[in-house]
Amino acid sequence: ILLCSYVVISYIRNVHYRKPPAGLMLSKTSSDLLFSLLFFLMLIQSETTISEKCDVYGPVFVLVFITAQLYFIAMCWDLYRTLRNPFRQPAADSIKIHLLVWIISAIIVGIVASQGIFQYREVYGICYTCNTGARLNWWNLLLVYLPLGTANLAGICVTVYAFRRLA
């Protein structure tokens, strides 16, 4: 929470930090900050209070998690495009990227939330996807592992491409 707050405050206070892709980084950091604040908010509330609000907390919790992952993927995409064409304007697609990140996240969470899968998980102390009892929870695969895996793969691929391109 402290590091995310430091990034947000630094961006606000220092005008020379406001260069692309700083807007994407600020948005990713803000999503991470909201995610961590919501996590701790759920932990400090009583079980009965939090379980009654899982229809709200669960989708919002997953929404900010997915937006953070999509912002990281967007920063990787932006770096890739900049390396391919160094003469393109750095902030050329920033509004489109922000819209895409939030629309994709909202669609995914909206579809999943309509299935009523969020419930209080006593083991974790938070509202999260329900335990299906199966070895593989498809909801976790869709909401956590695929966005996280895609973000990691994008980071690795753009790093390899950058090394090859700049070497």
Image (spheres, grey):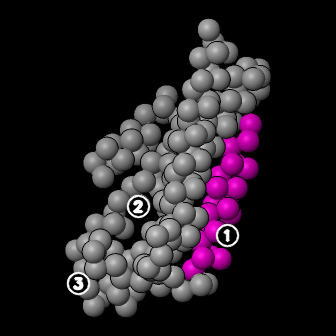
**On screen, 162 above or below 112?**
above
Give the image location of residue 142, x and y in percent: 58, 64
Q: Nearer the viewer, residue 136 or 92?
A: 136
Specify whether residue 96 is painted magenta: yes
Residue 19, image quadrant = top right
**On screen, 122 above or below 160?**
below
Q: Is residue 4 visible?
A: yes
Would you name the residue on which mark 1 appears? 107
Would you name the residue on which mark 3 appears? 46
Please, what is the three-letter code of the amino acid marked with disc 1?
Ile
* Mark 3 surroundings: few (<14), some (14-19) or many (≥20) residues within 10 A: few
> Residue at left 67%, top 15%?
165
**Res 35 label:** 2
* Mark 2 surroundings: few (<14), some (14-19) or many (≥20) residues within 10 A: many
Please, what is the three-letter code of the amino acid marked with disc 2?
Phe
Q: Is residue 56 visible?
A: no
Specify start and end residues of the magenta stretch as a single range.
92-113
